[in-house]
Amino acid sequence: MPKAKPDVMAVVLAGGRVDELSVLTAHRPKSAVPFGGFARVIDFALSNLMQSGLELVAVLSQYRSFSLINHIGIGASWDMIGRHRGVFVLPPYQGFGQSSWYRGTADAVRQNLDFIQFHAPETILVLSGDHVYHMDYREIIAYHRQKEADCTFACVEVPEALAHRFGVAEIDDEDGRLGGRVLQYQEKPAEPCSRWASMTVYCFKPRVLYELLAANAREDESFEFGRDILPRAMASHRKVYGYKFRGYWGYTRTIEEYWQTSMDLLGEQPRLPLEQWGTRTNLDQRDIRDCPPLKVGEEAVVHNSLVYNGCQVEGRVENSVLFPGVQVKPGAVVRDSVLFFDNVVGRDCRLEKVVSDVNVTVGDGVVIGVSAPPTADGEAAGAGHEGSAENWAGGASGDSGGTVTVLGWNNQIPAGMVIGAGCTLYPALGPEKMTRQRVADGEVLR
Amino acid sequence: MSLKLEDPLVLLLAGGVGSRLNNLVQSRAKPAVPFGGIYRIIDFSLSNVMNAGFPQVGVLTQYKPLSLMRHIGDGTAWDFAGRTRGAKILPPRTGSQDSDWYKGTADAVRQNIDFIRAHPAPEVVILSGDHIYSMDLDDLVSSHRRKEADLTVATMVVPREQIHQFGAAITDEEGRIVEWEEKPAVPRTDLASMGIYVLSTDYLLNYLEKYRDDLDFGMDLIPRAIATDRVFAYPFRGYWRDVGTIQAYWEANMDLLAADSPLNPAAWGTRPNPETEGLPYDRCPARFMGDSLVRQSLIPAGCIIEGTVLNSVLSPGVRVGPGAVVRDSILFHDCRVAAGATVDLAILDKRVQVGEKAVVGQGEDKTVVNRDNPKHLYSGISLLGKQAQIPAGAVIGRNCVVSPGSRVEDFPGATLSSGESVQPAG
């Protein structure tokens, strides 16, 4: 028997910037944002696909695609190489006739239908590359096929007060805990009909998807799966099912949510059990495969933290996530923070609730984020999304708008500077922007 | 442009047994022994070749080559990938005439003359896969060319009392080797051979065919060559260790922990190959939980630390349970030290499990040498072989050897006095 060609094509939507992530997406799409001390957000979707045996994958990329293309490489990190395996990054292109940027997720898929149709899949799995979760897609595909559905999408239960931020589905009891027929779908409704939020994981019958995309392109002004394609599927009385997902779903649309999802990695019983997920990343990226083991110094303290190879800790690190190459000098304290690749924290610094992008150097004695009023945020680590609404307190503005201070990449913070809580520093500000002694809480430096 | 004929060909001798490393080499060749948490010993030599930009390396294997072969793979971890680059494993093989195991360094090279002919190069660089060091091999070859040498021997200054372990060179003021003693009992020089040679290819081929009974470079070739040919010493200054004994191996690992250590794999550009492990997932960042206390240690990805780790080198995937203490020790991949256990001055091979409240390295007296291996274990270090299981509450003394695969039932009375060894039953 020759090996059969794949009958599922996975399409990963990875083109978006997501304004609310502020400076973290200044130079990369959301899906390429680092997460978990070694990985990128898209690694979770790609690892899920690999573990689900789905190894024919298209990645739709538009915004600042280099970092994503570089990260995915030839796909070998997820074993997606071979004659019928592969990850294909599909950027916008100029055509013989009309050419345009991707005007939305649905438009991106529609512009690449020839690629999808060439592979003649039985089922098309469309999913976002922006979320942190662990899911066996074989289960939703099996459910989709068992129900002979036109479209099946995965839903997760969110707190009532937050449901208005999502596409929500009212799902009947047809299959109990597993899921059921979708009776009603609302995109970001003021008054949600349900707490089951769409995770942006959709299975489609190809023919139905093609019809919906064609109608959308013909008749609509907006071209998004959540806002346009699902409502169209409901309006045209397609067979639409909701699959109920019960695991952890890290929704990281804002800086506060990004920070909270990172804190969920920590604690005695982490809500996000990274070790159990078996996530793979591309170890060639930034040469992290060559990093020597973490070196812990003579006076160092490391508590309740994740620290990757290539780091050197001589100070104190608590409740934090350190990516490769971070140095914490003697006397420095890093608490409740996420430091991306190659940050250097100088002597006697204090960092609290900081998310710092790559290549940030913090001079000696700098204090960042400490003026935040004493709250229960430290304890909130390990509580989570399904708990009370205050864990989702992220503002909707373009800047962090909360108590987390975010530092854009390639900044050099001069010695002695004091930066308050909830501040935002734009990337690569240069010394002329760094002349102030103090940046007040909530200020944006650009 | 050039066909890259200017690059030398490298032969890396990686067949050594390294028997003084005791049960660390029971299932692997010495070059494949893990080092510094994430490396294997051969990574240092392979990285030196990579960093010199030499495109072709043949790795001569013989003893227990499987883990070495898996580790080297196709060489892409060290960028030996492409049309004209490559790392090739060269095991002993049968042929029409030569059909034997490698009987010495020169013999091993002679049996691979076809490989040398298939990769035309002006020189052949011969390295050992046994050493921890960083050397600019490009400079070594430049020196060979500058001196118009037939043979260049890399040398370094060692304490005179150690010279008896090495080939010893006496040079003139130009660096030409005028006298040579292989492992001299009485030191006359402090210049030791590092087992690293550059030979002009024509000279090498001519020699190997002319003196077919010569088996070893140090014993046979060099003494013969200095009489008639241009043989030069290349002086190396820097960190270099032959980690061929348990004591030297432990000390070199501990050298990694010093604040400004001259042993600095990251600065040297030494590359490991994490894919050797063949895991279906990537190791997560090291996790520190509970009342973890870590000082002066190397903790790679995949470790989960809930206890205390002091002055130790861990490999990926090690777990140290709550209340456990690891001190002055080297733990290979995926070892488990259960809650309340102590590991003091020990080397634990892969997947060793130390049961709850067990003690490895008990007692102040470190002078009772190992009875079976008095020359391997004499300074207090205990050695626990691969996958050994130490029962909960067991007490293991100093200078003990626990054989690979030992199980809980192999410890009657759950104690092992200093200097004793345990073999698995049956």
Image (tube, rainbow, N blue to C red):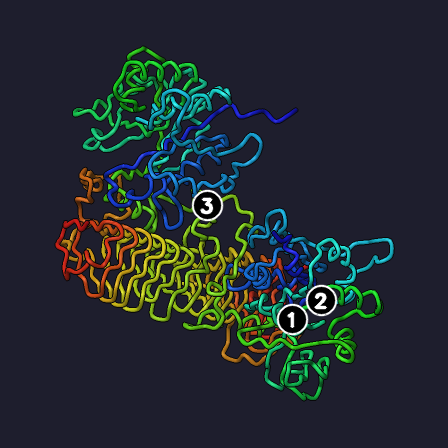
Q: Which residue is mark 1?
A: B144
Please give the chain letter of the residue carrying mark 2: B
Q: Give residue A14's quadrant in the image.
A: top left
- Classify mark 1: helix, strand or loop: helix
Task: Residue at 56%, 78% (x, y): give it.
Answer: B379
Question: Could you tell me which quadrant the N terminus of chain A lies in?
Answer: top right
Task: Residue at 84%, 69% (x, y): give it.
Answer: B211
- Classify mark 2: helix, strand or loop: strand
Q: Along the line of sight, which residue is nearer the eye, A20 or B199?
A: B199
Furthest-right residue in view?
Answer: B97
Q: Along the line of sight, which residue is nearer the eye, B204 or B92?
A: B204
x then y, percent, for residue B23: 64, 64
Q: Which residue is mark 3?
A: A282
- Against B409, residue B381 (above or below) is below
Please give the chain letter of the residue carrying mark 1: B
Q: CA distance from mark 3 to mark 2?
A: 41 Å
Furthest-front residue in view?
Answer: B1
Q: Is residue B349 visible?
A: no
